[in-house]
Amino acid sequence: MNKPVQVGITGGIGSGKSTAARMFSVLGIPIYDADSRAKYLMSYDENVKNEIIDLFGADAYIDNNVLNRQHIASIAFKNKKILAQLNAIVHPAVDKDYNTWVNEHSQFPILLKEAALLIEVESYKKLDKLIVIIAPLEIRMNRVVQRDHTQKSRVEDRIKNQMTDEERLPFADFVIINDGQKKLSTQVWKIYQELKQLANCHS
């Protein structure tokens, strides 16, 4: 059986990667949402939960399964060492979960993995192609403040712990500019056509 072309899509918080991923989904490409799956595993995978409790204490969870995001974020996004330890717990579990998902979707010619941290944890190396979505910092911050109903300072803390667009770009096979000027759907369609050609070469 031919292996699917595995493509990653990544970008900073508020860049619009989920919006772009949904457009690829409409075109028939299955999407693995790594960030949503990470949240699921942090709530329901007993090994992951136990390690998070060891790292953040009993306050890491409310009523057993409900992840206390505010408690974890208030510590992790202000301490790079603890954030790295959290990533070391969650990302191997996500990798394992993703591999299972790929096997379950092996009949599709193209698969898309959406994740905030593909470059930082080097999981992009296991993929065939990488799409990086970029947007001006001010636009990204405004999007997140509105979306999450949060304070600008909290968004700034999260951005400080991420790579910049300039740091991501050298890793990109495809770039999407989501600045409100260039049409997102046109850029997605163009990349989709190139991925289809690549998938045909694989078959």
Image: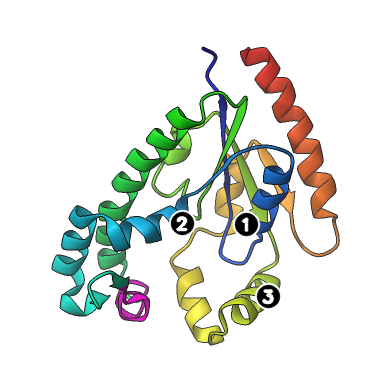
Pick the quarter of the image with the C terminus. top right
Residue drawn at x 67%, y 13% as measured from the top left: 201
Looking at the picture, does residue 133 appear above or below residue 109? below
| Magenta residues, start to end | 67-77
Q: Is label 2 or label 3 in front?
A: 2
- Measuring from the top left, give residue 84's x and y in whole percent: 29, 59
The mark that comes first in sequence, 2 or 3, is 2
Question: Which one is closest to the eye, mark 3 or mark 1?
Answer: 1
Q: Residues within 10 Å of mark 1 (few under 14, many from 20)?
A: some
| Residue position for label 2 | 35
Neighbor class of circle 2 (other Cα within 10 Å; few <14, some 14-19, many 20+) is some
Q: Camera-side residue: 66 or 129?
A: 66
Pointer 1 residue: 18
Number of numbered discs overlaid on the protein picture: 3
The three-letter amino acid code for the residue at tag 2 is Asp
Rendered image coloring scheme: rainbow
Mark 3 lies on residue: 138
Q: Considering depth in this image, is 30 or 188 the residue closer to the camera?
A: 30
